[in-house]
Amino acid sequence: MAASLSTALDVHFTIPKSDTKRPIFFTSPIRHNPTKKRLAISCNSSTSETSSSTKPPQNLSESPSPKNPSLSDQLKPLSATTLSTKDHKAQLLSKPKSTWVNPTRPKRSVLSLQRQKKSLYSYNPQIRELKLFAKKLNDCGSGEDEFESVLETIPYPPTRENALLILNSLRPWQKTHLFFNWIKTRNVFPMETIFYNVTMKSLRYGLQFDIIEELANEMVSNEIQLDNITYSTIITCAKKCSRFDKAVEWFERMYKTGLMPDEVTYSAILDVYAKLGKVEEVLSLYERGVASGWKPDPITFSVLAKMFGEAGDYDGIRYVLQEMKSLGVQPNLVVYNTLLEAMGKAGKPGLARSLFEEMVDSGLTPSEKTLTALAKIYGKARWAKDAMDLWERMRSNNWPMDFILYNTLLNMCADLGLVEEAEMLFEDMKRSEKCRPDSWTFTAMLNIYGSGGNADKSMELFEEMSKLGVGLNIMGCTCLVQCLGKARRIDDLVKVFNVAIDGGVKLDDRFCGCLLSVVSLCDESEDVAKVLACLKQANPRLVALVRLIEEEETSFETLKEEFRAVVSGAVVETRRPFCNCLIDICRKRDLHGRAHELLYLGTLYGLYPDLHHKTVKEWSLDVRSLSVGAAHTALEEWMGTLTKFVQRNEELPELFSAHTGSGTHKFSQGLANSFDSHVKKLAAPFRQSEERAGHFVATREDLVTWVQSRIPSSVTA
């Protein structure tokens, strides 16, 4: 080799004489009598010399030039001892990431996703026969004797692999459990964790938590290891069976053993804590899992969003969104649906709209559930324009529609008073092949026409339902009766009532309250008798109370006992409407004394808890939850009380106010107009406030002047 074209490199390494075959990278660092050798490695560009050594010699002694060995000859011993052999494979590893270890605490054991060793099956001619045998077990009867008789025909001895194959092929949990017990009684091979896990998963499908827990305790007794799959199966089954206490118990036991939960276990236990309302525990567990290296999946964030949504916690919902963004988790359709429902419960329609636009921009197509949630939010917030824009986008983009979504949109139209839009939706459903109008669809339309007082269209719809054979449910019946009662079409009302009775409609307290309100509207005694006859079939005791109120001989104590019996027997949400209607009936019949007695009884039994409010500067009367007649009675009662305070020279606030409310619904009747008329009739010193809508105000000086002008003929209760 030419010295001018070569570069020499001296490589020094040590080989102990005692063990020349030992790999040099694992020699002892203590060097005894080392023998140093110098290898002169030359790199030459000469083609002639390169071609002369194309085939390296097999070992150093066979080298044609032992005094000047080639590079391949020099490295041959090194490659023979450190590179690939039959037992070891060299791997190129990237630089490992540094991991901080707390020296004061032992590191928890983390099981990999492959938590059980899988057998490396080669082709086994027995597999086909074993699967046919498993099919025979699946097809046989559920009796234990019949199952055991089939087991006697097993084609091959139950080895570990064969038993595991059959166990995995059984579908009914009863047969999986029977075969598992049969394997244990044979005692051919030791039971392992995988057999328990496969059996537990089958039992989980059957919601057999007690048996699963029994097997888990058996594993503990027999010192068989419970791995992540075991604990995850136990916890998820307990959650499915609503055994939340057991799910928490086994999760805590898992943590005490040192096992770190996997994604499935974390999501399941987070859902359990959320269902139990343990928000702090959920957040603590979530943060602990993230700190341990666990990356939450979209299901986890769906659980968190649902939990905060149920509580109406907007800050919690924002926390979920920020966490997803920081961890780089892209929400899927399920997460978006959950977040939208949460936004609706938290009362954030604007944020719900922004979230929906973000979902569409990300390329996801909204489902029926997505659109239903958004339609409910817009309807509740009375966002008519946004609701109809949503409907137009649904039509233009051919987004999926189902019964629930159509009916939700119709109910939204009823809430917003959108009659024409509702009719368009209704006709669109009639043309649809998949979403033909059902009973709830007609009910929504009856609600729309009834709210607008359109009795003609309500009856046309009722006749159409009869022709199509669509049954009338209790809600539709209530809407019809209310609409016909306001229109004084009592004969049609009786007709609808009879159809409902013949159709098997179960009349409830809400429907009885509707009939009672119709009684308060009737002018003719004949119409009153017809409505009361219908009401008697639904609630005879309520009719008896109406008769008792009309009799002058009825004492207050008798009225009190009967009123308490009727009200206590009704559902909570109908008790105050019952009292309102009874007061209206008294006002209609000029029984003002009875009206005041009923208002007193309603207050006594807690039906009007927020009627009066007192502060140092203002006394107020809130009649928003009262009917017109009840509001007039409450005003008279209040004015009588204030008159007595003035006459006794008691200390009074600077301002008095009555709150009637201001309806934003275009069908809302409100109390403001009727209350204003009654105030003028009493010549009371109240006037409508310009600053506060739906409020009537009076100053202390105005009230004192009014009382003094009426003495000695002041208003009394």
Image (cartoon, grey):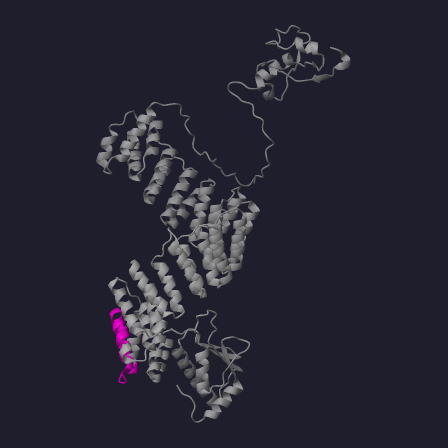
Kindly identify the residue that appears in the image at 63 percent across and 21 percent down: 30
Please provide percent x and percent y for residue 569. Answer: 30, 69
Describe residue 245's horizontal placement relative to residue 615 as left or right. left
Residue at the farthest bottom position: 712
Q: Is residue 194 magenta?
A: no
Q: Is residue 258 above or below residue 495?
A: above
Q: Position of residue 540 (x, y in %)?
A: 25, 72
Q: Residue 554 colored magenta?
A: yes
Nearer to the camera, 672 or 17: 672
Q: In which quadrant of the rendered view does residue 250 lie?
A: top left
Lateral position of residue 430 relative to residue 614, left or right? left
- Camera-side residue of 201 and 31: 201
> Where does the magenta region start and end?
529-556
45 up-or-down from 525: above or below: above
Of residue 717 and residue 181, the one placed in the foreground of this image is 717
Farthest residue to the right: give it: 4
Q: How many marks?
A: 0
Magenta region, mostly helix, strand or loop?
Answer: helix
Against 630, is 144 above or below? above
Would you identify the image quadrant in which residue 537 lies? bottom left
